Amino acid sequence: MKLPLIIGNWKMNHLTEEVKAFFSDLNSRPLPGTPWIAPQFIHLPLALEMKGEAKIGAQNCHFQNSGAFTGEIAPQALKDLGVDFTLIGHSERRSLFKESGDFLNQKVLSALAAGLTVVYCVGESLGERENGTTNSVVERQLDEGLKNLPATEKLIIAYEPVWAIGTGKTATPQQAQDTHTSIAKYLKNRDLDCPILYGGSVKPSNTAELMACPNIDGALVGGASLSSEDFYQILDKAHNLD
Ligand code: 13P
């Protein structure tokens, strides 16, 4: 995987014309690196058609590959469509949709088995940060989600402190780096070698200072990835650190 890695998570945003405009604009620019974009499921075929240099991913998937699971999306069906990666365990899935560690573990294993790259998301709440349990919470999430993990080169970890998501409050480079260092140690102990991305109010103005930190291998970007201009700026700044 080429680093730094910048992934746009569009969440439940954009209509068809906006997807088209985003890729038309991105495709007209000389790209400093490979952008990764996760649109809504319904826009995956259009994104795959217009992707240019980009890699296209899903924001979630089920762990079963077929069956009576109304409204769900199978990892194998995503792979079959040409999708490259999927997010698993985003904090919005954990908190709003009550996805448990065990459920997320099954998804991680199935998505990897289907040949998708998995971006497994972890992060603490404000209360957990304030009571000093950030590292233990993140470690528990890693233990749960990465149980029985096969040898793989298709795993990426995204550290997203919940209190920094969509709030405009970014972790300071020191806060982000401290947690990334702890995650890197955890991964090393398990003989896992994978990129660790930071997410939470990443924007063009704070990209350089975050990406300059050791152990921060890229960014998972929400709000600022909706604009092709901002996303391009983030990609550009991450690849051209002074
Ligand atoms: P924001 O960049 O909007 O804070 O969202 C971060 C995120 O949740 C990306 O997955």
Image: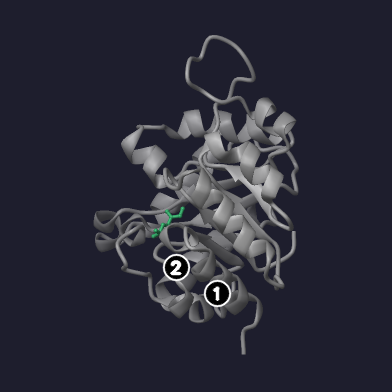
Q: Position of residue 113 (x, y in %)?
A: 72, 31
Query: Which secondary structure, mark 1?
Result: helix
The residue singled out by tag 1 in the image is 233
- Seen in the picture, residue 59 relative to 200 is either above or below; the reply is above
| Residue 147 position by quadrant | top right
Q: Residue at x 70, y 62 (%)?
A: 34
Q: Name the disc covering residue 10, or none.
A: none
Q: Name the disc covering residue 202, or none.
A: 2
Q: Residue at x 51, y 40 (%)?
A: 40
> Do we see residue 181 in this rendering?
no
Q: Nearer the viewer, residue 179 or 31?
A: 31
Q: Nearer the viewer, residue 200 or 161?
A: 200
- Seen in the picture, residue 189 relative to 3 is either above or below; the reply is above
Q: Nearer the viewer, mark 2 or mark 1?
A: 1
Q: Position of residue 33 (x, y in %)?
A: 70, 68
Q: Position of residue 156 (x, y in %)?
A: 62, 52
- Seen in the picture, residue 165 relative to 154 is either above or below; the reply is below
**Label pair 2/1, CB-CB below 8 angstroms:** no
Q: Is mark 2 within 8 Å of ligand 1?
A: yes
Q: Position of residue 87 (x, y in %)?
A: 55, 44
> Do we see residue 51 in this rendering?
yes
Q: CA distance from mark 2 to mark 1?
A: 11 Å
According to the image, what is the colour scheme of the structure? Answer: one colour
Farthest residue toward the bottom? 242
Task: Identify residue type, mark 1.
Answer: Gln
Q: Nearer the viewer, residue 227 or 132?
A: 227
In the picture, which quadrant includes the C terminus?
bottom right
| Residue 175 position by quadrant | bottom left
